[in-house]
Image: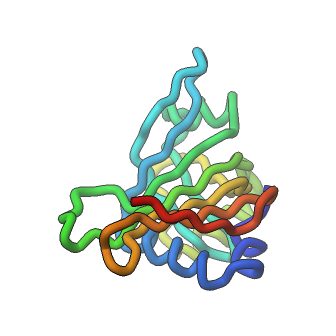
Amino acid sequence: MASWKAIQAAEPAFTSRVQELFDAGRHKTIATVRKDGAPRISGIEATFVLGELWFGSILHAVKALDLSRDPRFALHGPTGEVDPATWRGDAKISGRVEEITDPTRVAEVTAAEGGEQPPEPSHLYRAEISEVVLTQLGEPADHLVIEAWSERHGLRRIERQ
């Protein structure tokens, strides 16, 4: 698993395009693993600060219970209605989470995100990343370009008609 900072150091142009898509909208979609092994899809907000990818959850929300039991996740962004004529692509990040409970570290991340404390008790997660995928239209816009980074293979590019 890698930190966002480590992937940025290895592939700065790629991670810049991924982060731009994630930062284009506030809402993302996260997939977690339910107790019975089935996937669960939930809305979530995520941020890139302090060289890491962070997201949180309301205390004891079902996605938090899922992550406590099985730390694997997949995150997709941006989430929302998109006009096909203006679609800029989408990005996916998957890996495992580490829950951060140290109050000093939580305060540091909160300050870096803009300083607003959550309105109620919550969980804070740091992503340990295993894969990053960026899908966009090629030039000309008659095919898809899929760029995928993983620790095992590094950055790869695939074009599909």
Q: Quadrant of the C terminus?
A: bottom left
Position in image of residue 75 (x %, y %): 52, 51
Quadrant in which the N terminus is drawn:
bottom right
Which residue is pictured at 70% across the width and 57% down the height? 129
Horizontal and vertical percent for residue 43? Answer: 39, 46
58 w.r.t. 8: above or below: above
Residue 114 in the image, given as x and y percentages of width and height: 50, 77
Q: Is residue 139 above or below residue 47?
A: below
Q: Against 99, is 147 above or below?
A: below
Which colour scheme appears in the figure?
Answer: rainbow
Whether residue 9 is situated above or below residue 123 in the rendered picture: below
At 51% from the left and 40% from the top, the residue drawn is 31
- The residue sitting at 78% across, 73% down in the picture is 6
**Residue 107 visible in the shown view:** no
Which quarter of the figure has residue 111? bottom right
Q: Is residue 110 left or right of residue 135?
A: right
Place residue 52 in its image quadrant: bottom right
Q: Nearer the viewer, residue 47 or 120?
A: 47
Furthest residue in direction front, as rendered = 161
